[in-house]
Amino acid sequence: MAATADCDNCRANELKGQVRALNDLIGVAHASVSSIELDTLLGAILESAMNFTEMPAGSVALYDNRSGELTLRAHAGLSSTFVARDVWTVTPGGLTDQLLSRDEILFIEDTQQADYFNNPLAVQEGIRSLICIPLVTKGAIHGVLYLDDFKPRSFDQNRMSLVSVLASFAAMAIENAKLHHETRQMAVTDALTGLHNRRYFEKVLPQELERARRYGLSLSLLLIDADNFKKFNDTYGHPMGDRILATIGRSVRRILRSVDFAFRYGGEEFVVILPETAVDSACKVADRIRQRIITDSTKVLCRDVAEPVTVSTGIACYPYDADDAASLVGVADNLLYQAKGAGKNRILLREGRQR
């Protein structure tokens, strides 16, 4: 009788555990539809997944199929040193590559006992057990959800059997949020260059100026124009002109920080907003852009164009040159005009210094 009672108690406890797991999974589902803002959603998914698996740390990295890179977008319980590496390339044939291509969840109960686990950063962080969850929908890879513990552990099999359901919720929610983000971006993005369009510039500049004014910060604006663009178009045709503009767009994006803004202002003109940036730093950014455009255009267009593409730039800085949006653009535009007249392929400041 005692054995029967014990058995009944075991089954009752097991059922209670399953019910708790299902309730927790419902919590993950709620988190997965809590927002269509991608970063907010990723944070909610990570928090609920950590709670569901009872793991004290974790992160979410999104995958870029074109570059083969993972970018860290949410994290919790990890050191600043560990999360400082926020972009990394998936090594072909490596553990993450196999994880993504097979769409299989990986459970490691003790990293020191797993011969194939050789991530030096994770070892330094002290991660001893982890769950790696590929986020995949209909064959499309969106990223990886990592859940970490700093001690070896045995995973509850009943609860872990539901992790694949958790992964499906998270992946579908991320796919929807990305589609929403892409749809919004199409409305404010110039299709040729991949930069924001002028309409978005006219919205962002007053907002950034107000933020700079409120907190007593500097803000710099670069107005950039492709030199001799009409000559390129007349000599090589409009398709080549489009390639030049697309190359400039890529070059500008590669130089800027995540907090900066870049726009196609119109035709062959571009504008960059550098928040919290004084004029000396803005000059350095402008010169890196100028040199990067020369380098990239030489690599990309060398077989078709006899000379590299160059740009001229006018720089205006708030609050020193102007204190409102229209005046700031006016100062930068006038300096750009002077830079073009002074020989092109140069940067001009209001003080008259040429770079």
Image (tube, rainbow, N blue to C red):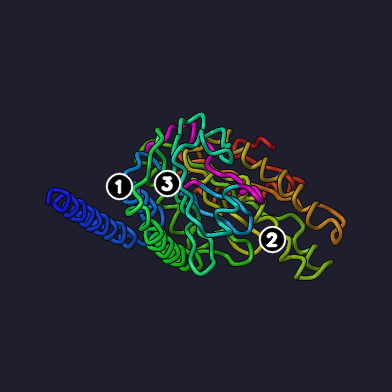
Q: Earlier in the sequence, mark 3 or mark 1?
A: 1
Q: Is residue 1 above or below residue 281?
A: below
Checking the image for residue 245, the label placed there is 2
Q: Which residues are magenta?
A: 72-94
Viewer-side label of 1, 2: 1
- Closer mark to the observer between disc 3 and disc 1: 1
Query: Which quadrant is home to the C terminus?
Result: top right
Q: Are marks 3 and 2 in contact (CB under 8 Å)?
A: no
Q: Mark 1 belongs to which amino acid?
A: Asn
Q: Residue under circle 3? A: 74
Q: Under tag 3, what secondary structure? A: strand
Q: CA distance from mark 3 to mark 1?
A: 15 Å
* Residue under label 1: 51
Separation (CA) of disc 1 from disc 2: 48 Å
Instruction: Return the disc, 3 or 2, that comes first in the chain's sequence.
Output: 3
Considering the numbered disc 1 on the image, is that residue within a helix, a strand or a loop?
A: helix
Q: Amino acid at mark 3?
A: Ala
Q: Nearer the viewer, residue 208 or 161?
A: 161
Cβ atoms at labels 1 and 2 below 8 Å apart: no
Q: Could you say which is closer to the camera, residue 77 or residue 178?
A: 77
> Residue flagged by tag 2: what amino acid is it?
Leu
Q: Is residue 35 magenta?
A: no
- Tags 3 and 1 in contact by the CB under 8 Å rule? no
Q: Quadrant of residue 289?
A: top right
Residue 320, image x, y percentages: 49, 37
Count of all numbered marks drawn on residues in the image: 3
Q: Earlier in the sequence, mark 1 or mark 2?
A: 1
Residue at x 57%, y 56% (from the top left corner)? 64
Q: Position of residue 63 (x, y in %)?
A: 54, 55
